[in-house]
Amino acid sequence: MKTVMGIINLQEDNKLIRELAEHRAVESIPFAGRYRLIDFSLSSMVNSDIPNVAVMLPDRPRSILDHLRSGKDWDLARRHEGMFYLPSSTEEGREGDLKNFYFNLDFVEHSAEKYVLLASGSFVYNIDFTELLRFHQNTEANVTMMYHTVSGEQTGSNIVIDVAENGLVKDIAEKPVVYDGSKASMGVYLFDKGVFVEMVRYAYEHGGSDLILDGIIRRADVYNIYACEHDGYVSHVDSTAAYYQANMDILQPEVWSELFMGEHPVYTKTLDNVPVEYKATASVKNSLIANGCIIRGEVENSILFRGVTVGKGVKIKNSIVMQKGDIQDGSLIENVICDKNVVISKDKWLKGAPNYPLIVAKNAVI
């Protein structure tokens, strides 16, 4: 994979997950107790021995920059190669991510790599991209995309494809809802570098705004497009419901094992913290508890991030509590997502629906 340059696109539409992404990029939303969403695509690139990884920054980059910093935790803080930040364009009057790729094309053109691997930062998976490169080379494709077969119903922005037995993409479209058995893009696209540069330049200079829509879908007949299937766990976290479900999926042993216990680790920003304190009154079932938590109450089917305090008589069920949450004595929360630094004061009861969790905003006191 030394001939591949990685680009992680952080221009995710946040309209369906605005409650959690109002003050941060979607890709920097905390996930699974200690990670951020961007950790999965970035770690997959690092584990695939991709030497150069560029991060296309969102319009509000502070949370991403604070998390990634020099890239040291991903072994990308190097004298040569490593991590690069590509700023978003300041051009007004045109929406979408295409303008950002266009105004950073010189970075791609001057690179020594032969291929460009473009990935969205809002998908949860753990992949070795070596197989994708081999497939791309064997088929002599201009563009190779990764897809997975959808289980159940999936809403949001979905790129759906029709694939021949040899992997050739026969049709590609964008749909707001897809159903069980559909073949949906994972936001991963491998290009020959020359194809990527030509695609971005042509689409932008002809009035386009979105790389996938205007560069690939509307010009699908111009390119030789193939698709490679990934049969492991995949979740696209582009809505509040998808975020909640993906975290609940992590509590399944087989999903946890696939994502975190295989040969390829998922890296994240390292924070030193004390172990969890389980007091005599604590009761924990099928939950993920991060370092620094103090547990005095009951926790079931839930995820607690670093530094959460659970008081006596508290019952937490099917919920997510982010960093430094304080759930005080006698409280009950069920089907709830608490953002960072939330305080649920004594004897308060909060309950959402399994398919529509209640969200408590960052720094709120209830």
Image: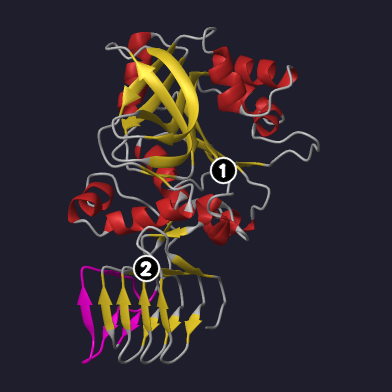
x, y percent for residue 311: 35, 89
Task: Identify residue for label 1.
Answer: 12
**The magenta segment:** 273-295
Q: Is residue 74 left or right of residue 13?
A: left
Q: Which amino acid, mark 2?
A: Asn
- CA gap, disc 1 to disc 2? 25 Å
Viewer can see residue 46: no
Label 1 sits on a secondary structure element that is: loop
Q: Quadrant of residue 305?
A: bottom left
Magenta-colored stretch includes residue 156 = no
- Residue extending farthest to the right is 92
Label 2 sits on a secondary structure element that is: loop
Viewer can see residue 365: yes
Residue at 58% x, 16% y is 218
Residue at 33% x, 22% y is 228
**Front one among 192 and 110:** 192
Residue at 41% x, 91% y is 347
Residue 50's place in the image compared with 73, above or below, is above
x, y percent for residue 344: 46, 84
- Mark 2: give few (<14), some (14-19) or many (20+) Cα within 10 Å: many
Q: How is the image coloured?
A: secondary structure
Residue 58's place in the image compared with 45, above or below, is below
Q: Is residue 99 left or right of residue 266?
A: right
Q: Is residue 298 left or right of residue 326?
A: left
Magenta-colored stretch includes residue 294 = yes
Label ID, residue 223: none
Q: Which amino acid, mark 1?
A: Glu
Image quadrant containing the N terminus: top left
Task: Identify residue for label 2.
Answer: 335
Q: Is residue 281 left or right of residue 101?
A: left
- Mark 1: give few (<14), some (14-19) or many (20+) Cα within 10 Å: some
